[in-house]
Amino acid sequence: MVSINELSPRRAFSSRYRFVLRFWAVGLGMFAGGCDSFNPAFVALIDDSGELATIDNAPGHVVLTLVNNAEVDERLLAYLESSEGGNLILTDAEKRSLRPRMRMRLRVTFTDGTFAVFEFIDGSQNLVDQNFDAQAFPDLNQNDLDNAVVICDVASVELEPGSDIEVFIPVELTGYELIEVTGAAGVITGVTYEPRTRIAPQFRTMEIDERDADGNVTLQRNIGVRDVPSPTLNPLCGSVIAIVVDGVLAVPFLDGVSDAPSYDQGDVATVAGIGGRYEFRVSVQ
């Protein structure tokens, strides 16, 4: 598991900054439950009169955060930078900070049986083909949300049942069908590929590896069976629950047929891996 303390300075600063902004939003409401639960310096900053110090203590809080450490495949990035891919222009610093755009829904269940659902979304919004009209897909215009604060007591934190983890595919994908060319007497003389389907840039559901009855992996997809986010049960008040994502956003290229993102529709393994490979770890601090 990856500790929050091991995050890069860029990611750590970004997460803390956004946390502070959201902390003001939820923090003012939490004062009704008591300001003594906050850092004394923070209380002094917003209450130099000391009038709020007489309010009863709050029950505490639990912080949830999504840490996106995934990267972008070099070939995909090179295509996006090409004229065919949209002439995406990025500085070296922007390239280093690129993160696949992904989203997931988390359910927080409290000990009294109530629950709250948060949709976390994080990643680079500029990783989009410039020929693609992002305004036609409002999903891309969602504000980032990579952390949240909830009041204790928390019974569990888990993926929302029935929901998916999704990653944004920033390019159009073309699916080809392999056609056998036959000559005289039905003899196969060669093969050719014909375009059959086009998939516009969009969020794609990440799939878990398929297994047989003995637990052996029969088809590798986007997430290993041991790499899905595990539920966190009965976290202590004051805990920070981090869902850490590692992996690489990637799409196939059907070499010899097209220089653009493409695949053979009959190639089951290639189709299953569209979107890349990822692993999720849950760290509780």
Image (cartoon, rainbow, N blue to C red):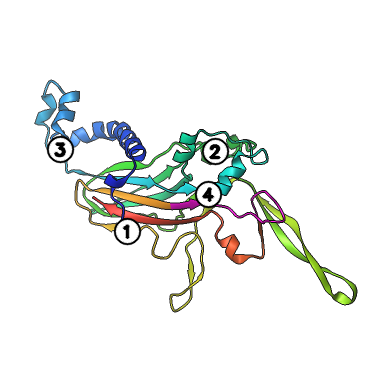
The amino acid beneath tag 1 is Pro
**Among the two numbered marks 2 and 4 on one chain, the one whose residue lies closer to the N terminus:** 4
SS for tag 2?
Answer: helix
Return the residue nearer the eye: 132 or 279. 279
Q: Is residue 253 above or below residue 41?
A: below
Q: Image point 15% across, 38% down: which residue?
A: 37
Q: Position of residue 158 (x, y in %)?
A: 34, 55
The amino acid beneath tag 2 is Pro
**Among the two numbered marks 1 and 4 on one chain, the one whose residue lies closer to the N terminus:** 4
Query: In the picture provided, is 83 more to the left or to the right than 155?
Result: right
Nearer the observer, disc 1 or disc 4? 4
Residue linked to disc 1: 231
**Among the two numbered marks 1 and 3 on one chain, the one whose residue lies closer to the N terminus:** 3
Task: State how far apart marks 1 and 4 are (Cα).
Answer: 29 Å
In the image, which disc is placed on residue 160? none
Residue linked to disc 2: 138
Please tell me how crowded label 2 is: few (under 14), some (14-19), or many (20+) other residues with Cα within 10 Å: few
Query: In the picture provided, is 99 more to the left or to the right than 149?
Result: right
Whether the magenta-drawn stretch holds residue 253 is answered as yes
Q: Which residues are magenta?
A: 247-262
Q: Image point 72% across, 61% down: which residue?
A: 177
Task: State how far apart marks 2 and 4 are (Cα).
Answer: 25 Å
Residue linked to disc 3: 37
Q: Position of residue 255 (x, y in %)?
A: 67, 56
Q: Position of residue 96 (x, y in %)?
A: 45, 40
Q: Image point 44% across, 58% down: which residue?
A: 162
The amino acid beneath tag 3 is Ser
SS for tag 4?
Answer: loop
Residue linked to disc 4: 73
